[in-house]
Amino acid sequence: MINLNHAVQFQRTLWLNQLTKAQTIVDATVGNGHDLLYLANHCQKGTTLYGLDRQAIAIEASKQRVAKECQRQDINCHFIEGRHEILLSDTPWLAAPIDLLIFNLGYLPGSSHELMTQPTTTIEAINQGLTHLAPRGLITIVAYPGTPTGEAEAQAVHTLLTTLPQQAYDVATWMPINQINKPPILYIIKGR
């Protein structure tokens, strides 16, 4: 059962419907590969998945996790090292519009907390991702407002998403409301 107080797990309920038809999936912050592994294990035959990250250690950890824990031969999984805002603006690697784009912001678990996603580059990456989103495509963004940088980033994402035109996108947010500290927030964008 999915933990309803856990934004990272809760977003998977949204992914499941999208995965029934998604052919191109991008994890823009692949981290240790947990989300990409979930997507690889649940996507349709013939799906192409891309795992992006700016840290070589994250790319390597994700490659190893997917190779070890996903034995599927009927999907294509690619890993690209680089900054998500740059990779999503310069996309010769992208062969089709994105059906599902995910961001899990913050820092790489198990590594330095000093290297975190940043508000300005995250906003740029989301904007670039929107330009490549397929009709009826889905974007999920998990933000972590528990640090000053994370709080600024969550606010920047919130501000951006309130400006998206209602005629083009359904936009929502989800977060636990009775949790101490500042729990992760899930932002959802669905193309119309």
Image (cartoon, grey):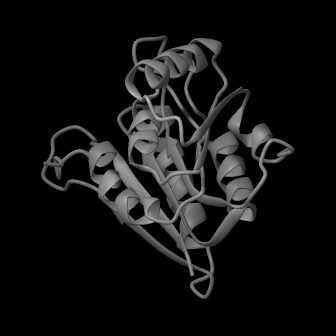
**Residue projecting furthest to the bottom:** 167
Residue visible at 23% across and 44% down in the picture = 6
The residue closer to the viewer here, 93 or 104, is: 93
Task: Give the percent coordinates (x, y) of residue 50.
Answer: 63, 39
Task: Give the percent coordinates (x, y) of residue 61.
Answer: 50, 15
Task: In the rendered view, tell whether residue 99 sits above or below residue 41.
Answer: below
Task: Give the percent coordinates (x, y) of residue 121.
Answer: 69, 41
- Residue 79, image quadrant: top right
Residue visible at 77% across and 39% down in the picture = 87
Task: In the rendered view, tell whether residue 41 sits above or below residue 62.
Answer: below
Task: In the rendered view, tell whether residue 64 sits above or below residue 49.
Answer: above
Left or right, residue 91 beside residue 34: right
**Residue projecting furthest to the front:** 73
- Residue 70, image quadrant: top left
The residue closer to the viewer here, 24 or 114, is: 24
Left or right, residue 5 beside residue 29: left
